[in-house]
Amino acid sequence: MSAELADRFLAVWGEPDAEVARRRLEEVCVPDLDYRNPVVRLGGTAALAGHIAELAPMMGESRPVRTTGAQFVAGWCRYGWAVRPPLPGVDLHGETMFLLGEDGRITHVVSFHGALEGRTYAL
């Protein structure tokens, strides 16, 4: 496993052609991919590709990029990301986790937006 898979997944974002996005997604994801973030829950690479194509005009030249290393544990990967250059008035960033299937492609994606709030512990 390598961080290249995360980079290839992120590289699809901003693609204005849903069919091209679907084909690119299926290089790294299974066709019945389960994708979730705070705004949408989508089933399948075709649905995610359509979502990506809808967002493309708003993204302009901005793209999500990996901002951390990638950690792999028991088939899961997690990494931090941010949209760069930032969209006007929006600093969109977060963390994504995905699960790999037996064929090495992504089967499930959960993407979180924003930073986790700090917590203070008292002893």
Image: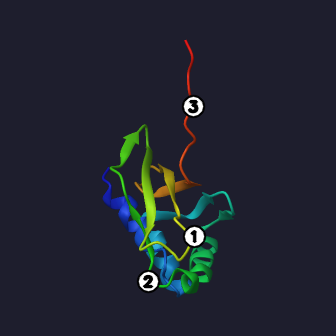
- Real-space CA distance between mark 1 and mark 2, rounded to the nearest whole angstrom: 23 Å
Foreground: disc 3 or disc 2:
3
Query: Where is residue 26 drawn, in percent x and y?
Result: 47, 70
Q: Earlier in the sequence, mark 3 or mark 1?
A: 1
According to the image, what is the colour scheme of the structure? rainbow
Q: Quadrant of residue 52?
A: bottom right
Query: Where is residue 88 drawn, in percent x and y?
Result: 53, 77
Q: Which mark is residue 61?
A: 2
Residue contact between numbered discs 3 and 2, judged by CB atoms under 8 Å: no
User: In the image, is residue 101 above or below residue 120?
Assistant: below
> In the image, what residue type sits under mark 1?
Thr
Name the residue at 63% across, 58% down. Answer: 37
Q: Earlier in the sequence, mark 3 or mark 2?
A: 2
In this figure, which residue is indicated by the disc labeled 3?
119
In this figure, which residue is indicated by the disc labeled 1?
45
> In the image, what residue type sits under mark 2?
Glu
Name the residue at 53% across, 55% down. Answer: 107
Q: Report the side of 101 relative to 1 (left or right).
A: right
Name the residue at 47% across, 51% down. Answer: 101
Foreground: disc 1 or disc 2:
2
- Real-space CA distance between mark 3 and mark 1, rounded to the nearest whole angstrom: 37 Å
User: In the image, is residue 23 above or below residue 118?
Assistant: below
Query: Where is residue 81 drawn, in percent x and y?
Result: 44, 59
Towards the viewer: 32 or 24: 24
- Mark 1 falls on what kind of element? helix
User: In the image, is residue 101 above or below residue 87?
Assistant: above
> In the image, what residue type sits under mark 3?
Arg
